[in-house]
Amino acid sequence: MAAHYIVATAGHVDHGKSALINALSGIDPDRLPEEKSRGMTIDLGFAHIDLDGVRLGLIDVPGHEDFVKNMIAGVGSIDLAMLIVAADDGWMPQTEEHVQILHYLGVKRIVVVLTKADLAGELADLALEEVCEQLAGTPYADAPSIKTTALTGEGIPELKQLLKEQLAGVPQQQDTGKPRLYVDRAFSRQGLGTVITGTLSGGSLNKDQDVVVYPDRAPSRIRGLQNHNQQVDTSHAGSRTALNLRDIELAGKQRGGIKRGHVVTLPSLGEPSKTIGAYLFRTNREHLMAKGALQAIRHGTRVRVHHGSSNLPARVFLLEDKAIGPGQAGFAQLRFDDACFAFAGDHFIVRDWPEEFTLAGGIILDPHAKRKHYRDAKNRDYLEACASAGEDLPQRLQAELACHRAVPSESLLRQSIFSQADINQARDALGLITESGMVIDPAYWESLKQQVAERIDMHHAKHPELAGLKSVLLQQLGIPEHLLPLILRRLCTEGFVQAGPVIRRDSHNPRLPPDLEKAAEQLRSAMRNKPLEPPSRKDLVRDDPGKKAMQFLVDMGEVVDLGQDVCLMRDALKQATDRVTAFIAENGPATASDLRKALETTRRVAMPLLEYLDLEGITRRQGDVRVLRDSGE
C-alpha cells in the first residue's frame, strides 16, 4: 500500500497557491465540483500527486475564511504545510495569521515556498530571507525553503523532491481504530445519492460498514468509497476519502441532513457534547498581529470555534483569570450552541464572533465536561493534569483516575486520540486495578478495601457474639454504591467470608456470652422438640436475650428464617427438603396439600417452606402443583 500524506497550502490571498498546486499536480484545485466532477470523486476543491510510491493529497483554498473552514479537514489530517509567499509582495498580515493557525492546529512541519520568483528577479533571495526572519521565534524557524515560478515550472521538480524528503521523516497517521471523517463537501449525484468528502483520520472505513453521522446521531451505511478517483473497499487513515452514504439526505434550509462540519464515525466511539473542557493558548507575536486580533478573550466571550471542518458558535468560560490576552494561556470551558463531537487531544481554533480575526488555539482535554462546579479545584486540577500529560498516555491515564478514581473500562479514554490497544497496554503497565469491568486507581482501591476491613474488624471487636457485619451497614462509609459489591467480592478472596447479607473475617469465631448461650440452648431445645413443627418465632423469642440469641443462630446458619414467623433448624430444613424432593420424584407433580401431608406438618409451616424451596430453585410452581426445578427444563 502506498504511503498517504496530506499537504496543505497556507498564505496570503493572490500569492499563487492555486497556480502552484496546478503546477505540481496538473489539477486545477479551484474548479467547481458541479461543473467538473465525474461521478463520485474526491477532487472537489482538492488535488493529488504521486511521488515514487508516496501519494499526496493536496489541499488548497484561495481565500482566508475558506482556509479556516475547509483546510481543517480533521485533527491530524495535515502532515505538512506549504507556506506560500509571493516574491513580489512578501510577508503579509494574512501570512502571519496562517502561520499562527498552523501552530494552533499542531502542524509540526512546513516548507516555505517563494512563488512568482520571476517577478522579483535578483530580489527573490532577499524576499526569501525576509520570510525566514519572520519565522524566527515560531516552531517553523528551521523550515526548509525554495524559490519557484509556476508559470515556467522553475523550482517545481526541486519542490517535489523537497516534499518527498520532508515527508520521509513523517510517520504515517496511526490507525487507532477510531476513524473520523469530518465532512468538507456534501453533494448529491444521480444514481448514487448522497456523497461526502473529507480527510479520514484515526482509522479505516470499509464498504458496507455501519456508521453514524454526528451531531445529528443519524445512522447510515457506506455504499461505496473512493480514494483519488479510484473505487476501493477500504480507506485508510490519512487518505482523502469520498463516501457514498445510504439513507442520508443533504442538509437544506427547511430540513436537517448532512453538511460541512458533520463527522462520520463509528457509533461505539462516544457521543457529541455541548460542553468541553480545554486549554487555550495565544501567540506572543503582538507586533505582527492585526489590531483586532489583539483583543482579549474574556469570561463569557462569544466566539467561533473551528474544530475538524466545523464552525461552531460558543461561549468561553474561564476557570481562573478574567481574560486571556496575547502571549497568555489558560483553562476554559467551551459551551456550544450545538453539540460538538470531539476527542481528548484534538486541536481547535478560536476566532472572534464576526469571524474577522484568529484569537487563539486550543487543545480539548475533557470532551464531556460538567457545567456544575466547573471552577472547583478538583476540575482545575484535572484539566491541569491532562494538559501536563499531553500525548503521554500513561500520564494521561493517571490524570483520569486521579480525578474519577474508578472508570468503566469500556469508556476509559474511549473518546480520545489514543487507541484501545495502547490504552490497555498502558493500563497494565501502570498496574491499574481491573475489577468487573471497572478500571480503578490502585491507591484508591486499597484505601476502600482498608476502610471496609477496618469497619468489619471494629464490628467483630464490639460484637464478638455476632457472625459478622451486615453488608448494608457498610453503605454508611460513603463508598460509591457501584464499587461496594466489587470490594466485598475481592475481600472474599483475601481472608473474608460473606454468607447472605453478612460478611466476616474467616478467622472470626463468633461466640455468645454465657447469658446468651443459655438462651440459645433453650431455643435449640424448643425447635428440636418438633423439628418440622416448631413454635412460631414470636413464641420462641420473648425477651431481649432471646432475640439476640436467635439472631446469632440465624447469622451462623444454624437456624434458617423462612419468613412468615417460621424458623427451622438447618438439619430440619434438610430433612424437609429431602422429603419434598423424594415425594415429587416418586409421585410426580404434587399439590401443597400433598406435600404438607408428606411433611407431617401444619399449613403454617408448609407454605413458607414450599415458597422457600421455590426461591432456592429446588422446586417450581405450576398452577396448583409443584415440580422439581430440573424437570421439564
Image (cartoon, grey):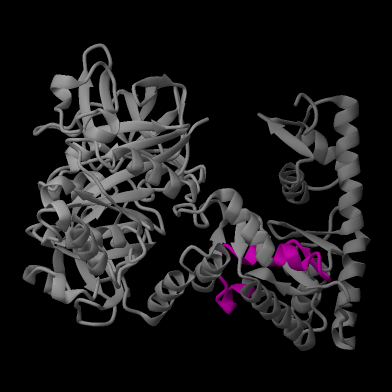
Q: Which residues are magenta?
A: 473-501
User: How many circles with numbers are drawn on the protein?
Assistant: 0
Decide if residue 270 is on the left or right side of residue 507: left
x and y percentages locating residue 406 in the rendered image? 56, 65
At 79% from the left and 77% from the top, the residue drawn is 466
Residue 146 as seen in the image, left or right of residue 355: right
State yes or no: residue 484 in magenta: yes
Seen in the image, is 438 located left or right of residue 539? left
Q: Quadrant of the C terminus?
A: top right
Which image quadrant for residue 527? bottom right
Residue under the point 33% across and 66% down: 141
> Do we see residue 264 in this rendering?
yes
Q: Is residue 180 visible to the viewer in this orientation of the structure?
A: no
Q: Residue furthest top?
A: 191
Q: Position of residue 152 (x, y in %)?
A: 19, 35
Residue 260: in magenta span: no
Q: Nearer the viewer, residue 367 or 41?
A: 41
Q: Nearer the viewer, residue 233 or 383?
A: 233
Task: Indicate the quadrant where residue 225 lies.
Answer: top left
| Image point (28%, 68%), residue name | 333
Against 284, residue 248 (above or below) is: above
